[in-house]
Image (tube, helix red, strand yellow):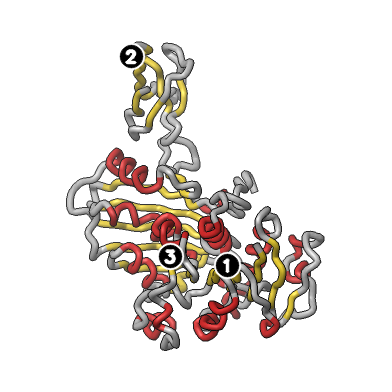
Amino acid sequence: MKAVVVGGSGYVGGELLRLLLRHPEVQVVQVTSDSMAGKGVGRAHPNLRKATDLQFVPHATRTPADVTFLATPHGDSMQKMPELLSNGGLVIDLSADFRLRDADAYPAYYHAEHPHPELLKEAVYGLPELHRDAIRSARLIAVPGCIATASILALHPLAHAGLVDREHVVVDAKTGSSAGGQDPGRAGTHAERSGVMRVYAAAGHRHTAEIEQETGLRVGLSCHAVEAVRGILSTCHAFVPRPVDDKELWRTYRGAYGAEPFVRIVHETDGIHREPEPKILAGTNFCDVGFASDPHAGRVVAIAALDNLMKGAAGNAVQCLNIRAGFPETTALEFLGLHPQ
Amino acid sequence: MTQCPECEAKVERHDKVLGEVFPCPDCGTELEVFGTTPFAVQPAPKEAEDWGE
């Protein structure tokens, strides 16, 4: 299967290339980047030195392929999607441009009218744990956002089982610096980022729309920048109309994820890694999901951790490709992570 | 086969013997075999800290 990566010089593009260059069923034939055109892939992604002879080419020279991955900034692919669908084969878009089914949500969350609302109905939200069957026949797959992925996977079993008050859910998310991309501006400088514990979106974060769309819950999302390069930790506070104990939570989460290759239920009674934590997930496609009942406060705490560049972006995109193409779902995604690191 | 008393995970006997302690595959609780026919487990007693003796 011939693949093109559009916008391959960013962190997500680099992670996609790391995975695709070792995927036994994929041949990367082109990587585009206007800013890096003419330079070797290893210049932008030094971990890929000697792994490929590919050089970046301008976006305008993009060639047809069996699958086209879009790792471009939000707002780019929504303009170009009709052309991409005409000659790009399967399109897997890692931007936010086709994640939301409601076109009216784009002005609210992305400050732009969507130019092709008719395509929003066709796009499949690329979260295999919720939409695997639809992914199998999709022509356009919209890969979820990183904070959204963690939060949805944490909350979905509770919402699906009807265990929680659907109007009162609070999500507290912590994120590493790579989630901001290569050009985060002054907020990403060492002086501002080192040692950081900053609320960068107390309310109104864009991923709120995705979480609400996929869970059916009304969510208050607050996001924090913390001292990490990779990683998302989403701690979700869901209030329950009746007591829910740990055994019921185990049954609920097992029912949702017992057969999932990349979701691990982590809620251990002992040890120092009893609940999900992103540090051990760097480079892996796992989303670890845990929970705790809190009868004192009448809530359930749902927790999810992942690597924002992997299950939160590139890894999930490759998982979607594997499902769509009929490859074994874990192909090129079997790395178990490092401990310690 | 039986269930973990903490999280209800399926626990297989395989070749476990009476008194054997092993971790639940899901929640990690240390379980002790207290019956083999039928197979039965219970949380293993935790080693208590005992300072000052």
Q: Which is more toward the observer, A311 or B34?
A: A311
Secondary structure under the numbered disc 3 in the rendered image = helix
Q: CA distance from mark 1 to mark 3?
A: 16 Å
Q: Residues within 10 Å of mark 3 (few under 14, many from 20)?
A: many
Circles 1 and 3 on the same chain = yes
Residue A28 in view of the camera: yes
Q: Is residue A45 above or below residue A236?
A: below
Q: Is residue A44 above or below residue A61?
A: above
Residue type marked 1: Ser
Secondary structure under the numbered disc 2 in the rendered image = loop
Residue type marked 3: Ala
Q: Position of residue B3 (x, y in %)?
A: 34, 27
Residue A148: mark: 3
Residue type marked 2: Pro
Secondary structure under the numbered disc 1 in the rendered image = helix
**Chain at tag 1:** A
In this rendering, which labeled residue sits more in front, label 1 or label 3?
Answer: 3
- Residue drawn at point x = 52 percent, y = 62 percent: A312
Residue A81: mark: none
Q: Quadrant of residue A3?
A: bottom right
Residue B38: mark: 2
Q: Which residue is mark 1?
A: A177
Q: Position of residue B7 (x, y in %)?
A: 34, 35
